[in-house]
């Protein structure tokens, strides 16, 4: 009797941990964003970008860090982003 109760609790805890881990992955992938400095019509603006978009931009030299350590977009808003890495 005790053994069955213990197994049931283990299964419930395992399922809760799987659901919690899945929800944290979804939150990180869909809702986590970072503020990026960009240019629009020659004026600096702040834009919120998802981390997946930032990873793509960083892989093709679309973003870089400025002197202060903030992330800066290398192309102007509304212009075409770099299609390939510059190196």
Image: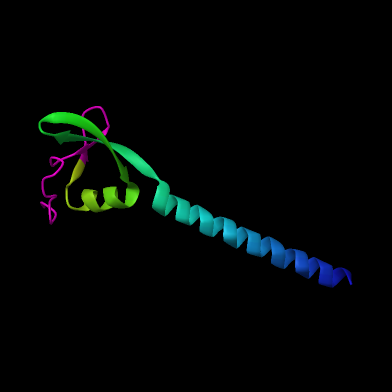
Horizontal and vertical percent position of residue 54: 28, 47
Range shown magenta: 64-87
Q: Is residue 39 above or below residue 14?
A: above
Is 79 inside the magenta-drawn segment? yes
Displayed quadrant of residue 1: bottom right
Is 69 inside the magenta-drawn segment? yes
Horizontal and vertical percent position of residue 13: 69, 61
Residue at figure coordinates x 13%, y 44% from the top left: 78
Q: Is residue 38 above or below residue 19?
A: above
Displayed quadrant of residue 41: top left
Q: Is residue 15 above or below residue 54?
A: below
In the image, is 41 to the left or to the right of 65?
left
Residue at figure coordinates x 88%, y 68% from the top left: 2
Count of numbered badges drawn on the protein: 0
Residue at figure coordinates x 14%, y 54% from the top left: 85
Horizontal and vertical percent position of residue 15: 64, 64
Displayed quadrant of residue 37: top left
Q: Is the magenta region chiefly helix, strand or loop? A: loop
Q: Is residue 2 above or below residue 75?
A: below
In the image, is 54 to the left or to the right of 22?
left
List the single residue furthest toward the right. 1
Horizontal and vertical percent position of residue 77: 16, 41
């Amino acid at each position: 009797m005790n053994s069955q109760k213990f197994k049931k609790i283990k299964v419930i805890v395992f399922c809760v941990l799987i659901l919690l881990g899945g929800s944290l992955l979804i939150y990180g992938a869909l809702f986590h964003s970072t503020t990026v400095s960009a240019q629009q019509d020659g004026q600096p603006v702040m834009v919120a970008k998802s981390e997946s978009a930032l990873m793509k931009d960083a892989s093709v030299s679309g973003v870089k860090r400025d002197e202060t350590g903030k992330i800066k977009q290398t192309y102007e808003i509304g212009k075409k982003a770099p299609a390939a890495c510059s190196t």
